[in-house]
Image (cartoon, rainbow, N blue to C red):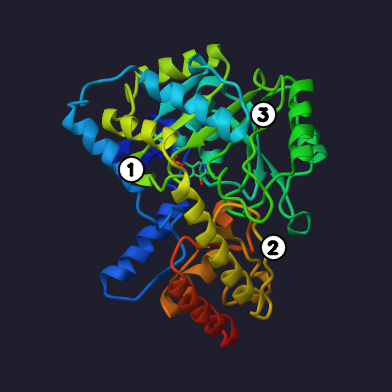
Amino acid sequence: MDQATGMKLEEGIHLADRVNRINVSPTMAVMQEAERFKARGADVVDFGPGEPDFPTPDHIKRAAVQALDNNRTKYTATAGIAPLRQAICDWHAQQLGSSYAPSECIVSVGGKHAIFNAICSLINAGDEVIVPAPYWVSYPDIVKYAGGTPVIVATHEKDGFRPPPEAIERTITPRTRIAIINSPSNPTGAVIPQDQFAAILEICERHDIWLLSDECYSHFVYGDARPYSIASVPGSKERVIIAGSFSKTFAMTGWRLGYALAPVPLIAALTKLQSQSVSNPTSIVQYAGVEAMRGPMDSVRVMLAEYARRRELILAGLRAIPGVTCTAPQGAFYVFPNISAHLNAELPDDMALAKRLLEREHVAVVPGEAFGAPGHVRISYATSMERIEEGLRRLGRFFGAGK
Ligand code: PLP
């Protein structure tokens, strides 16, 4: 702390409060640590990454190449090219039963960017945002960056990590502006049943707060479940902000493409913010996005089938380890086992356990603390069956043989 200014000094540099309020994404920190081990030649089984291990489908890549060849390399409209905004609305209507117009759509630099812009557009200092835990790591930090207060609602393993609507309602105060719902969830894979989602929507309507629905994993649901959007409920649109992403559905994490669907005045605010920051998402990426939205969805089905096989393998393997319990994820590509029975004086928390696991067995997982759920770790099964088998062998040895 600098006595004269009262500002926090970061390696001698005065940083703004809004930056001092937030932390580097803890999932990125784990990935960096795993990278260090890999750089030293260690054979790391990396259960860390929250991204598909599949390549982007060829037809999407070709559309980007064609956009380059056609010199689509200039600035675009801030909210995205018209054909993409239309294609997103059409895709969302067809896949998820909504009825948005392009004026209710903005294209962003990833789904995270859409969430960031929405929160920054709506939150004043002291405003509250309801975030069910375990949560995706970025929600609380984005809220803090905007000057707001994340209000965490704990969910429980016994409820399949689904937030009971009453629990959400109990945390609402006059300062509450937004409730964030992420279904399927990162990190638990929980999928909120439609009636529960509708009950949360009704609560938001009654208390005049926004429902920010993060649909990043919408197309990765298992068994009989089908992709679902709360925006398909008639009359919901005035209350709902949809954050969508191309990253997971089309294996396009590095392309940075996402969108928000919301009422026109809010889209106008998001566009204003975008116009003063990134200007527009990358032009050629937007043309690839049109192809993703308009082209065949076969690759999504192939990826889902493969995730389903991996899910079976990892669930069975984890449940066979004494002292480890694990709810079955209904969506996304993560499992979130409870490892608290393995904590002790030497390994007091999941952070210490994850560190030891990486050092001893070269297995990278993300500590549950990062998601507001100590006593757990997140394991991503967006990796091959062979690596999952190898990882399970090492986990069995680690938990069985003492730490
Ligand atoms: N929402 C959730 C729940 C996520 O897990 C992620 C990425 O990991 C995102 C949003 C952001 O995705 P992107 O910015 O790549 O579209």
Circle 3: element type = helix
Q: Nearer the viewer, mark 3 or mark 2?
A: 3
Can you identify the residue that label 3 sits on? 232
Of the pair 387 and 102, the residue shown nearer to us: 102
Of the pair 65 and 274, the residue shown nearer to us: 65
The tag on residue 354 is none
x%, y% of residue 82? 38, 18
Can you identify the residue that label 1 sits on? 59
x%, y% of residue 13? 30, 37
In the rendered image, the vertical position of residue 45 relative to residue 66, given as above or below: below
Q: Is residue 273 left or right of residue 206?
A: left
x%, y% of residue 32? 35, 59
Q: Quadrant of the C terminus?
A: bottom right
Circle 2: element type = loop
> Marks 3 and 2, Cα distance to the nearest angstrom?
28 Å
> Marks 1 and 2, Cα distance to the nearest angstrom?
36 Å
Q: Residues within 10 Å of mark 3 (few under 14, many from 20)?
A: some
Instruction: Tell how many labels.
Output: 3
Q: Quadrant of the N terminus?
A: top left
> Marks 1 and 3, Cα distance to the nearest angstrom?
29 Å
Mark 1 residue's CB less than 8 Å from ligand 1: no
Circle 1: element type = helix
Q: Earlier in the sequence, mark 1 or mark 3?
A: 1
Residue 6 in view of the camera: no
Q: Nearer the viewer, mark 1 or mark 2?
A: 1
Please give the name of the residue rendered at 67% of the width and 66% of the height, measured from the top-left corner: 326
Amino acid carrying mark 2 in the image: Thr
Can you identify the residue that label 2 sits on? 327
Please give the name of the residue rendered at 35% of the width and 21% of the height, measured from the top-left corner: 81
- Residue contact at pointers 3 and 2, CB within 8 angstroms: no
